[in-house]
Image (cartoon, rainbow, N blue to C red):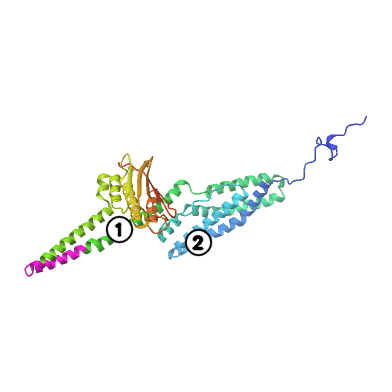
Amino acid sequence: MTAPVPRSLSSVDGGDDRERLPSVRFAYDGHTWKEIAHLLLNLPMSLFGFVYVTTTLWVSGILTLTVIGIPLLAATLLGARQLGKLERARARALLGVRVDEPTPMPWSKRGAGSQRLWMTLKDPVGWRTLLYDFIRLPWGVLTFCVTLVSLFVLWPVLPFVARGLANVDRAMVRGLLSPSDELERRIAELESDRGVVVDTAAADLRRIERDLHDGAQARLVNLAMGLGLAKEKLLEDPDAAAVMVEEAHGEVKLALQELRDLARGIHPAVLTDRGLDAALSSVASRCTVPVQVTADLPARPAPAIEGIAYFTVSELLQNVSKHSGARSAAVDVWRAEDRLLIQVRDDGRGGASLDGGTGMRGLADRLGAVDGLFVVDSPAGGPTTVTAELPWRDRS
């Protein structure tokens, strides 16, 4: 009887019940080789980062005695952000570390150059990246030497060595190159918003000063001169003096009207006395197109929020009168949980935008400074819908 052929020694050309020999493959998988590549790149990257940090900080520290040092330090922090971006990309590609990019510097809002410089100098992302590059040189030398020696001498245990060293790298990237936490981002945003509020307040003060100087003040000066001339002619020519007094009386009425309009522009009395509903109805009555006002508010919000809402609607209705060519408009104001929502609609020609030169950008900045939102939906041909959202704060 012929002995059966063992399955392990059977021909490769046999049926499905015969096993094949395993294919030839590397002992290390792709993840291990990526970790080894990352560890070997640590030396040149850490050397470059250390030279960048020490050189730029030393030079900018020496030059702080002049006007060049502070801007150079700010440029150093901006450059550190780019180095951090490169290190995060290397960690994602070779170590599989998913670290989000930090929030960009909030420079989209208007602000002076000094404010941007100060914001850059206080950037926590840049400072943490400088710290990361400064302490990496000893670690980069150690990982490079250990990995290189293990690659030729301790290659059987190299995967374990590489994994341990790479885990330390992962921890350093997560700890120092991760985005700022929510509190840091919030602080940076509030500092930027504070600058917007200061600029807006300064612009409002300049507008009030200009209106007083060019309007009521000029009329009062003319009034004083007219009354002085009338006083001189009172005995010589009473009829001419009476005419001049009559003209002065007209000037007084015009000056009072201008002062009343200016006071309404600062803070209308109807808003303080009767609230947002009555104040918006008063604004709507002065619009050149019919405006339907609907206010559904269970209570009055804080005075600051109430004032911002009033001036937002007032500015939007002025845009409707001047630019929209609309035949009708509507204003809706209501509260949704902890937000105050405002919506102004018109059936005009549309085409409004934040960059259209109609004050939309200023409104967006003013609302953004108090955690509000401002959205414009105005396709060409209309209609236009502007939605504003403000945080609700109780009046008490």
Residue furthest front in the image: 327
- Give the x, y percent position of residue 291: 32, 49
Q: Nearer the viewer, residue 314 or 152?
A: 314
Question: Is there any visible trace of residue 347 in the rendered image?
Answer: yes
Q: Toward which corner of the image does residue 340 lie, by quadrant?
A: top left
> Is 231 within the magenta?
yes
Looking at the rendering, in which quadrant would you find the C terminus? top left
- Give the x, y percent position of residue 57: 50, 60
Horizontal placement of 70 versus 147: left or right? left
- Give the x, y percent position of residue 255: 21, 59
Neighbours of disc 1 within 10 Å: few (<14), some (14-19), many (20+)? few
The residue tagged 1 is: 205
Q: Is residue 139 above or below residue 210?
A: above
Neighbours of disc 2 within 10 Å: few (<14), some (14-19), many (20+)? few
Q: Which residues are magenta?
A: 219-240
Numbered disc in front, either 1 or 2: 1
The residue tagged 2 is: 58
- Give the x, y percent position of residue 307: 31, 49
Name the element at disc 1: helix
